[in-house]
Image (cartoon, helix red, strand yellow):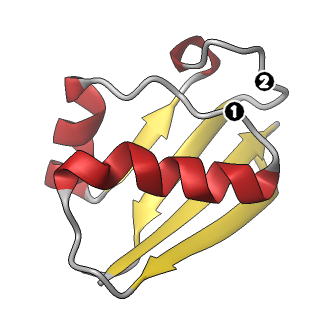
Amino acid sequence: MVKLWIKLIKDDKIIKDVVVEKQDAFEWVNFADYLTEGLYALDEPTPVVIKHHIIDFAKFHVVRFRPSDFVESVNFDYMWVENLDR
């Protein structure tokens, strides 16, 4: 099961959030697709996912995306993605 909590943070406050839930087994190759689904619901762009993001998520069950990880400009300080299905 996949259960990700995506939070957009600005000035240390959550300005938008969404929980992405799937009944399928979690697959690393689909990590960017899970983000895209959640961010589509928030009407926000998807960041560029690199190896460093995957390693942080695998090791700590959380990952932080900064505005520099996005191709488009964003109106938040960072995006926090947390695994709720541990």
Assign a secondary structure to mark 1: loop
Instruction: Tell me how many marks there are.
Output: 2
Mark number, residue 45? 1
In front: 11, or 22? 22
In front: 60, or 41? 41
Q: Quadrant of residue 20?
A: bottom right
Q: Is residue 66 left or right of residue 28?
A: right
- Mark 1 or 2, nearer chain start: 1
The vertical placement of 48 against 18, above or below, is above
Q: Provide residue 3's location: percent of width, then percent of height.
A: 42, 77
Quadrant of the snapshot with the C terminus: bottom left
Q: Provide residue 5's location: percent of width, then percent of height.
A: 54, 67
Asked whether the residues under the numbered discs 1 and 2 touch, taking CB atoms below 8 Å apart as contact, a structural biologist would say yes
- The alpha-carbon separation of the residues under discs 1 and 2 comes to 8 Å
Point 57% across, 11% down: residue = 68
Assign a secondary structure to mark 2: loop
Q: Provide residue 40's location: percent of width, then percent of height.
A: 71, 51
Identified by mark 1, the residue type is: Pro
For disc 2, the marked residue is 74
The vertical placement of 68 against 50, above or below, is above
Point 56% across, 24% down: residue = 66
The vertical placement of 19 against 14, above or below, is below
Quadrant of the snapshot with the N terminus: bottom left
Q: Is residue 36 left or right of residue 76?
A: left
Q: Is residue 80 left or right of residue 49?
A: right
